[in-house]
Image (tube, helix red, strand yellow):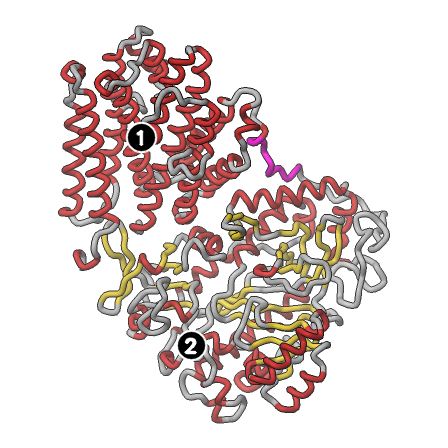
Amino acid sequence: MQHEVFANTEDFGGPDIVAGPGRVSRPGVDVPYASYELGKPYDEMFARDGKVRLPYASVDTRISTLPLEELTRRQQACEQSFLHQGITFTVYNDNKATERIIPTDLLPRIVTAKEWDRIERGLTQRVHALNLFLRDIYTDGRVLKDGVLPRRMIYGSKHYRREMRGLPVPHGAYVNICGSDLIRNEAGDFVVLEDNLRVPSGVSYMLANRDVARRAFPGVFRAMGVRPIEHYPLELLATLRSLTPFHEDVSIAILTPGVFNSAYFEHAFLARQMGVELVEGRDLLVNDNVVYTRTTSGLKRIDVIYRRIDDDFIDPLIFRPDSSLGVPGLFNAYRAGNVTIANALGTGVADDKAVYAYVPRLIRYYLAEEPILENVETFLCREEKSLQHVLANLDKLVVKAVGESGGYGMLVGPHASQAERDEFAEKVKADPENYIAQPTIQLSTAPTFTGNGIEPRHVDLRPFILHGAETKLVPGALTRVALKRGSLVVNSSQGGGSKDTWVLSQ
Amino acid sequence: MLSRVADSLYWMSRYIERAEHTARLIAVKLDSMVEQTPEDAAASWARVIQALTGEKVPALHTDAFAITKRLAFDRSNESSMITSLALARDNARQVREALSNEVWENLNRLYLRLVPVTMDSIWVHTPARLFREALEEMHALEGVTYSTLSHGEGWYFLELGRHIERVQQLGRLLDIHFSAAQDGNAVPKYFDWLVLLKFCTAFEPYTKQYTASIRPQKIAEFLLFDSEFPHSICFSVDRMTEALARVAPGAPPARRAAVERLAGRLKAAVDFGQVDELMSGGVAAFIADITKQCEQIHKALYSSYITYGAETVL
């Protein structure tokens, strides 16, 4: 007889068999969708007339025939599994540290093969154009001479790294790991909301979500022909390998800020999955422009660093002198060609929210192609006409500071008070170049398990694009969920969670 | 292996060993106190406190509830069971990539299960039960580590941490029992020697060797010099020597020699120690010497493989 604190809490239950057809689940009427209100945004599961969309039929059959208690139990099993794996972040309150899991929702989000095909082609195209753009602005600056975008926007950006000028990077690949955020608009089309070209995170949650969702709905999973994503670490490793001229015995390391970083789980996860070293700045040293790590047997050379530290902190001799996370001398070793850093330094200049507005033009400029994926309509406050429009329509727009990320420095007009809008208007007027605005984007909603049965919650989609000698996408993505009812903020730093994304093979 | 990783593995293992030792002492003590007079139980608790925290407390102030709380769950006590497990887990988290999933999850789960436990909840029925179960989990963790982790360099750093810690804990426990008379403390009685064996999971192995006749000299001989019993000083020293020969395989000979010389000296002291020479009051001196040698090995291990200056190897 075991003490109750030792009881097994991570039991997902037996394999689920998909029940036969014959029942209709109406949102807003039937359990478990009794409080599922369809609104203006596109809903991933239900069409406007309340009928279940075809790709969701099996999922619907499964979840609407399971008692709510059983769904609750499976949801809790998912959460227990995350807790035990240590997929947590620490919240400090009253000097007490509490560990919380990164919330996960067990209901999968489905992307059809046709939709994925467009996403894959669109993002491949986009990453190509962005890399050509980066190479251009760090060499000839042809795009600026041709007046495609204003010089000041690039040279004035705090993310433009003069130190990178003229420095060749392998395959011209500046951005090796890219995480672009897509949303589905009211018409049901995927559009790009932003690109993350610095140190995008979340791929470990994509894999961890898959692990629990597959265990929660094994029967449905198998029946639906979901494309596998487990080879992501292998593809990442191949991408990193392709970045060095050495072919035998390439020594690769992931550089992490350390255990207190909120994405530490991911850094350790990827190191384990790829079988490479996980290093902190203090483990590395540079001698004669060669990077070494300190091992018990002596110093060992490092050829490729997948860094999960921002540019600013990577080398105190070149960038922020107060950084204790980085490695003194790393940049010179990089410049000497003795080590490859992925992503290259200075990529942040291209995921600036102002540059974002120009990406469709960049695609046409560099590739002479039409963009496959559209942008969200964007007003640049630096342009006088747009600024007036933005100030006059603050209650309808989302205004963002161009250099920020993670949901900081933004105003969601329709949800803000008049006082907040007035205050923000002053900020915009004082520094218009620093702001862009977009119409309130109605992120699509997806069924999400809540304390109140299944309800719609806003979601986005972050696929990960790998770019080295080749460009590859693993058929999957991180679907981030705004867990608060009605909220549009999906960032995990602000109460967002995530769920598994099932890309179907047909 | 990264020096920082070796450092974390070593400490993770030391802390787990410390937590296990603490849990065992508490479990045995809680079980055995019911058979003792209040005075004997108090003296025995005082020895447990001294063994686990190094503090000498007057035997009168011994309230089992308060002591258990302090030794097991007090986070301000830096050697309590929960603090040790928390530190073990912090170290493990820093080297997730060097551990198997199973090792991490077992340790993490054990810690998370103990966090919400309150003294009131365990005191209602049989308080020792929780500690016995925690011990089972820690033994399971040891087994999981043995069978899911490659027995490479990382494994040997875990071995080093475990056995250096074990020698120190065991040494302190023996010292308290064998030098009680000189120190003017309550002299252990027959039952206390029996409990000492149980503190070291040694009761049955001892009786197999020496029959059930409980004699301090035989106990000393067994816990110091038995080469087959896992909680003897000799056994741990053998494991340490073996582990030291396997870590840092590529280190330059000069740095290796600094560590191996010390290990050889320690092994010789234990291999050629004679219990009859020690019994006339020399047990404490012998243990003090062994403990000091372990500290020297710890220091040499760090300066040779972990904190060495980079300029010395470039």
Q: Position of residue A438 (x, y in %)?
A: 66, 78
- The residue sitting at 28% across, 62% down in the picture is A285
Give the residue at x 55% y 55%: A205
- Name which residue type carries label 2: Gly
Which residue range is magenta in the image?
A: A5-13
Disc tally is 2
Residue A339 placed where, x, y %? Answer: 32, 68
Closer mark to the observer between disc 1 and disc 2 = 1
Q: Is A313 rendered above or below residue B225?
A: below
Relative vertical location of residue A112 with respect to residue B126 in this rendering, above or below: below
Separation of residues labelled 1 and 2 (CA atoms): 63 Å
Q: Which residue is mark 2?
A: A172
Give me the residue at 78% from left, 48% from top.
A61
Q: Position of residue B139 (x, y in %)?
A: 43, 29
Examine the structure image and report whether residue A399 is included in the region drawn in magenta: no
Could you confirm whether marks 1 and 2 are on the same chain? no
Chain ID of residue with mark 2: A
Closest to the observer, A94 or B193: A94
Say which element carries label 2.
Answer: helix
- Look at the image and say whether residue A12 sits in the magenta stretch: yes
The dot on residue B68 is none
- Confirm whether residue A505 shows in the render: no
Q: Circle 2: is it few (<14), some (14-19), or many (20+) Cα within 10 Å?
A: some
Q: Along the line of sight, which residue is nearer the eye, B43 or A51?
A: B43
The residue that mark 1 highlights is: B54
Q: Position of residue A429 (x, y in %)?
A: 60, 85
**Callout 1 environment at 10 Å: few (<14), some (14 to 19), or many (20+)?**
few
Q: Amino acid at mark 1?
A: Gly
